[in-house]
Image (cartoon, coloured by chain):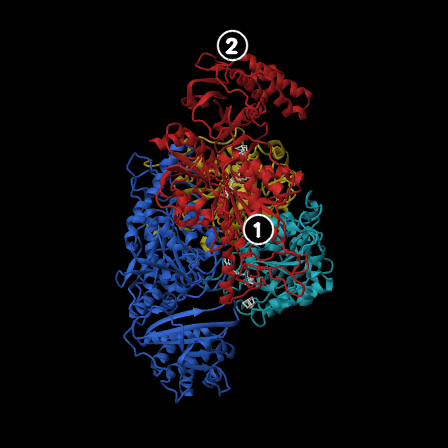
Chain colours: A blue, B red, C cyan, D yellow
Amino acid sequence: MTTNIRICGAAGQGVQSFGDLLARTFASMGLHVFATQSYLSRIRGGINSYDVRIGSEELFSSARKTDLLVALNRESMEQEKANLALNGVMILNTAESGGNYLALQMDKLAQAAGGTARMANSAGAGAVVSVLGYDLDALHKCLTEEFSKKGRDIVEQNLDAASRGYRAVAGHEGLVRAPKPAGAPSTLYDGSTAIAIGAATAGVKIVFSYPMTPSSGVLTALAGLSHKYGMVVEQAEDEIAAPNLLCGAAFAGVPAMTTTSGGGFALMAEGLSLAGMLELPIVIFLSMRPGPATGMPTRTAQGDLAFAAHAGHGEFPKIILAPGDLRQAFDLTRHAFELAHKFQTPVILVADQFLTDLQKNIPALPDAPDYINLHLAKKSAPGKAYERYLVTDNGVSPRAVPGGDSYVVSASDMHAEGGHLSEDFNVQIALQDKRMRKITGILNEFIKPEIYPEPAGEILLCWGSTYGPCRAAVNLLRARGRDVCMVHFPMVWPLDGAALAPLFEGRRVIAVEGNGTGQFALLLRQAGALREFSLLPRYDGLPFTAEFIETEVLS
Amino acid sequence: MTTNIRICGAAGQGVQSFGDLLARTFASMGLHVFATQSYLSRIRGGINSYDVRIGSEELFSSARKTDLLVALNRESMEQEKANLALNGVMILNTAESGGNYLALQMDKLAQAAGGTARMANSAGAGAVVSVLGYDLDALHKCLTEEFSKKGRDIVEQNLDAASRGYRAVAGHEGLVRAPKPAGAPSTLYDGSTAIAIGAATAGVKIVFSYPMTPSSGVLTALAGLSHKYGMVVEQAEDEIAAPNLLCGAAFAGVPAMTTTSGGGFALMAEGLSLAGMLELPIVIFLSMRPGPATGMPTRTAQGDLAFAAHAGHGEFPKIILAPGDLRQAFDLTRHAFELAHKFQTPVILVADQFLTDLQKNIPALPDAPDYINLHLAKKSAPGKAYERYLVTDNGVSPRAVPGGDSYVVSASDMHAEGGHLSEDFNVQIALQDKRMRKITGILNEFIKPEIYPEPAGEILLCWGSTYGPCRAAVNLLRARGRDVCMVHFPMVWPLDGAALAPLFEGRRVIAVEGNGTGQFALLLRQAGALREFSLLPRYDGLPFTAEFIETEVLS
Amino acid sequence: MSGANENSAIETAWCPGCGNFHILEALEHALDTLGTDRRRLVLVSGIGQAAKLPHYAKANVFNGLHGRALPAATGIKMANKKLLVLITSGDGDMYGEGGNHLVHAMRRNIGVKAFVHNNQVYGLTKGQASPTSEPGFVTKVQVDGVLSAPFNPLALAVTLGVSFVARSSAVIPDHLQTMMQEAIRAKGFALLDILQPCVTFNKVNTYKWYRDRVKELPKNHDPRDRDQALAAAMTWGDEIPVGVIYRGARPAFEDAHPILSGAPLVNAFTQTPP
Amino acid sequence: MSGANENSAIETAWCPGCGNFHILEALEHALDTLGTDRRRLVLVSGIGQAAKLPHYAKANVFNGLHGRALPAATGIKMANKKLLVLITSGDGDMYGEGGNHLVHAMRRNIGVKAFVHNNQVYGLTKGQASPTSEPGFVTKVQVDGVLSAPFNPLALAVTLGVSFVARSSAVIPDHLQTMMQEAIRAKGFALLDILQPCVTFNKVNTYKWYRDRVKELPKNHDPRDRDQALAAAMTWGDEIPVGVIYRGARPAFEDAHPILSGAPLVNAFTQTPP
Ligand SMILES: Cc1ncc(C[n+]2csc(CCOP(=O)(O)OP(=O)(O)O)c2C)c(N)n1
Ligand SMILES: Cc1ncc(C[n+]2csc(CCOP(=O)(O)OP(=O)(O)O)c2C)c(N)n1
Ligand code: SF4
Ligand code: SF4
Ligand SMILES: [Mg+2]
Ligand SMILES: [Mg+2]
């Protein structure tokens, strides 16, 4: 069973910290948590919301309807009440009782506890756990942990505020049916943190980014980890600088990454091509939001894939990974660095607002440094001059870094094996072929798509962050007797059409994509893997949910 | 019949002005001229060459072999003699006679004529016309025209130098067989000039570019025309500025364009997306050279098409035109502005080093201003507020410009019909759908590919500048009895797969492309127009020739 | 007013107490005082909190990409020099992402007015350092505080001989209005750096901090004297001079340019746009 | 010297008589005089005629994109601060396309040495104006002559408190060599603007033009005095001062940064790279 709790209110009212607190509390109780955010591109006002969905089994999608709505102001309640589930309950932050809601004066309760209005969240959370029929222990423990650094007094005031909130809804305990704790992991992550830990443990030492929603979460998380892992996290002057700086760092032997969103990524296209030409391992994290141009800065989309796959002038190998859940976000971030270094070429790690803001409790991520193999060249053969771009069978040349025995020479102009400029036509062919041969090696390491639960006549084709909602939708559809499965790609570029074609042969394919054209399906068609497909798009800025997919498939 | 004359020498030796002079001379004689350049990315030294091919019928390709080689230094002769045709003749700029070449001391001859070493070209040209069996009249006329502004003396000296060159090879008149004048047009253009005239006559008033080979020819030509047409030609601080400035100019009602090559284009991707979002008519001229990164700055390629088609984050309509010859370069440049204004969206005009440097004599291009329709809105209906982004059936909204009755509001963030910011999900869907509906209108105006000479079992599929070489190759192959035709696309994006599929059904398709992956064929496959194709690629930086294609097809 | 778009109807999305409100008000007063024909006014911005301002004023609006207000404004001015082209954008926008455009727009001295809301922080993206943040300023990204020296846009403008260079602040709205009027009246490029409290993310450079420091330039300050101007531009500390720092002698780009100095380019197509 | 790449074997692609030859020679002398370990030297450049220099010297080479030498050099220095990271690139590269990086690299004061071959023209692309071209300079693109004011990188550097700011010229090779040595010895960012004749495309700023004008700063010029430095940086005309214009007091980024001030980052992976 699952229950959906939605906190809503104006930007600046603390919707996010309220939601955070609940998510942590529930996770610590052993409930499965799936928490998502919806916010506007403004610092104050408007209507933001935070969904904390809890369940007795692992959750993969948020819910359309709300079982318990907590509105921090009346305006947001008016907007959100249309989404209340049958038997849903509303709590409104107000003094005026007498509507079809429970009135709760959160800041008053906080003040009564001797604290400031800022502790209103604690009071609200107390009310929430009561209405869900839980006791106060887990909430109290979470508050104690959160505020212990601020001193005994603050802790006590928060605990008291929570208790007062709990008591304020006395008589309504258990009004909303809620799942029983189910031994879920207590470690709660959001997508940004999972990616940041992945990068830090993989050995990234230089992070160079210009802030851009929804990628800044990863940047901020990395900054927070910079001392722990010995990373330099520096703000870039612009996105154009970023891939160039990364190339410099990689040239000198240090794994480096940047974080951005669509507009910033667009400014990196030339630098991406540079990394392809200099054969340098750089990692660009691209967190998508709806475009074109500035678009919807705080919303989600999968609209930049076709661009990313073809970004950069000229032809060069490039890898795109798109994690589907939090563990994969961690794993594929590490893998991005591994592949970049193994094949000496740029890797784009693609996620979106939905995945980076998504919170889930999963088994603890290993956070000890476990550096990837940089695949640096051993000493060059005695007497033989070192050539940075030696033509090899697999296209990968021995990579040395400056400071050692050999001069390392890299040029963005066409160059010969030694790295120096060349305008010889045969050299051009040889070096271009060498670079492109890496694609064969990369395709050999293609990450097989996940088929869930088993091959079926109908396929929900998806990639990246839609993993969860599609997987959950498949369950809903199969429960209705539909012969459907999910095929999810965590690696989306390059594609081997011939190898992938059998997956789809004789099956009906529905491409579930957060864009309006079916970009991934089109890439598959371009590769020769797929011919016909129907499209189940979403491009209003909101994430897919299982129910949304179910409805669309059935309609 | 055709004859190929190649001038070669070091950069700085005047290869280009020598070749220019010959091309003009031959054109003025009524010979068909096809002249191409091959040069290095340096200002002095190295080996550059200039091919002037002449014929009694219109020419579409350069030749592999040289009938008459004029070497300005020995080094270049040594390199080029391998390309001499059977019965080919070499002229070397030297005092030392006694090899298998005609020795000609060009600068000495020029000095003897009382001129400077700079007039060596005139002496050399005199020798060339003699060896080809022509008389001096046309050359003398060209020299008179060229130097008349510099005064009588200079003219006389040049004429004298030409005569001395002519006499210096006495006894070898007509040594190389050459075509008879055939009434070809006397007006000689290069691709850059054709494009510049197209833009200027279409009404472009603002040109804003950062110099980049091989696009600078168009920029320079436009600068030269700026007073004639009243255009502001301003050098940009960088390529990032360019599309943004163009958007500003278009917003205010003035057609504007920028010129660039791959790396610079990469820096424009974000601005391209802006034009898509603000629905502004801007034109980007992209002249391709081999990438990735700096690549081969002075060479040719067709390697940026896939990038251009998908460039820019998010989804928005975009048009790509790729002229195949000089007249089409003029026409499609004008058409680029027409389409941009009709559909209020960015247009990319794609050419490459081969086409922009290509010289041919064609009927005079109409150079009187003949402005395209800006499709500006008439006065808005009385009482009704003007909305810049009014949702319409065809996706095109009435465009007003600031300074009139109505405020014009444009925002790169998601906006409502009035142009102001909106974060409403339904507005997002409505406006995104509106923008994308323009694609239907654009596809209705798709320029049909040219089938030459008639449909056949085998297709040489090509786009853009390969028109000429492919067309000529088809003639060569058909002469050998091969059932082959050319299908050439001058408009390459967007593509209507269903409409185009019948073109290819049941036919063997060979994609002739100046890249290593068959980018246009892959776009066709992505669109669903094409399934199987074989690739005839070239990516060494040199242009296709008919013979190259013939050999590859037959092999 | 047929077909007009009453922008001022749009709800502002700024935090209560934000310095931007004073800037908007000063701008409206300045425009009213000057009797500016709003139909000929284009407000241009990039992306940020400041950059939302054009939506709240009565004007034509070009709200472009982050960092790219200047090239857009340059294009508008080139296309139709009869328009009053005025940028209202943030310090990150104009001095960070847009830094190169600033240098080169000032080199051109094109007749665009740039009003920079300098809150010394990135507001919209939630509080990272901007190019003018104080050294030591701690944020979630600059966890050890800002190490870089603050960018000095005014000094740069003086070295480039820009037509009009001034500083004011949202905390002195009357002064600000006067500076805006002067900037609009000046020919050529105008850079007006406006110190602006961000009540949410900048807890260092507060209303009080600015009020305690801003000080009008002495009466005898000669804005035609480059050395005096440079000295004023470089003063930042317990006292921060406000006022007209410099008036350069260079002609505006649109007056010096052989083609632009003729009729507005847009006239080639339409004498009276709808 | 196993596995070494004898760069100096590469044929130069410059025009005979080009000022770049003198810069290359001065650089080689400076490095030899300082006894620089060439294995620890990285020459970084963008694209242009100047930017080809790294290929002709004995060094590690990072020849990146046009305009992007600075971020690349910054990345190299951050990754391995033990390397001597030296940029040799053109005025278009560093002041035009790369203008924003220059501003912000100087704000950081990262220990990178930037030697700018300032020929006041775009050489490689055949003679368009550069950001430092003289007003009135006529080219095939600037058919009516340059209208914009020249960019003054030295003045900007002074306003940002950069560690080392100097000017020299290819026409005074000994002086140039000394300046290079000083720049390399200085901590933090070093900007050395090198006036360079381009014999092919710049017929205004010739050898003679520079020789007639360059003049060593007076003995009593105090490079620690910001006002003197600014005055020297702003002098351009019949006399153009050369020498060490300014020495800022700010620490180098790599010394001030809490993480970078530790062991070189690259040490986390390899103590002795191959
Ligand atoms: C290319 C690009 N990079 C980054 C962003 C994200 N972004 C939006 S506003 C902003 C900074 C805003 O700071 P500022 O210009 O100082 O304006 P303020 O919000 O402080 O008024 C950033 C980094 C973007 N929209 N586009
Ligand atoms: C993104 C990009 N834009 C433009 C170019 C073309 N380009 C190459 S070098 C150059 C200018 C060179 O001028 P400068 O930096 O002064 O060097 P110089 O040749 O004068 O030494 C330009 C515009 C390029 N390679 N990349
Ligand atoms: S975040 Fe700062 S700048 Fe933005 S509206 Fe709030 S107070 Fe103003
Ligand atoms: S073009 Fe100028 S800068 Fe380039 S090599 Fe020749 S003289 Fe030197
Ligand atoms: Mg700001
Ligand atoms: Mg230069």
Q: Residue furthest left?
A: A454
Amino acid identity at mark 2: Gly
Subunit bearing disc 2: B
Q: Is residue D271 left or right of residue D143?
A: left
Quadrant of the image occupied by residue A29 = bottom left
Residue B49: % across, % down: 48, 27
Query: Residue B342 — which label?
Result: 1
- The numbered mark, 2 or 1, whose residue comes first in the sequence reads 2
Regarding residue B350, the answer to whether it shows in the image is: yes
Vertical relation: B371 (above or below) B248:
above
Single out the mark in the foreground, 2 or 1: 1
B343, C34: nearer the viewer: B343
Q: Position of residue A65 (x, y in %)?
A: 40, 75
Work out whether residue B436 or residue A66 is closer to the camera in this orientation and state it. B436
Q: Are marks 2 and 1 on the same chain?
A: yes
Q: Chain of mark 1?
A: B
| Residue A235 shows in this picture | no
Q: To which residue does mark 2 refer? A: B171
Q: Amino acid at mark 1?
A: Lys
Image coordinates for residue C157, horizontal then vertical, percent: 63, 52
- Position of residue D188 relative to residue B470, above or below, is below
The dot on residue B104 is: none
Q: Tell me: D123 left or right of A193.
A: right
Q: How many marks?
A: 2
Callout 2 crowding tier (Cα within 10 Å): few <14, some 14–19, many ≥20 = few
Residue visible at 53% across and 71% down in the picture: A44
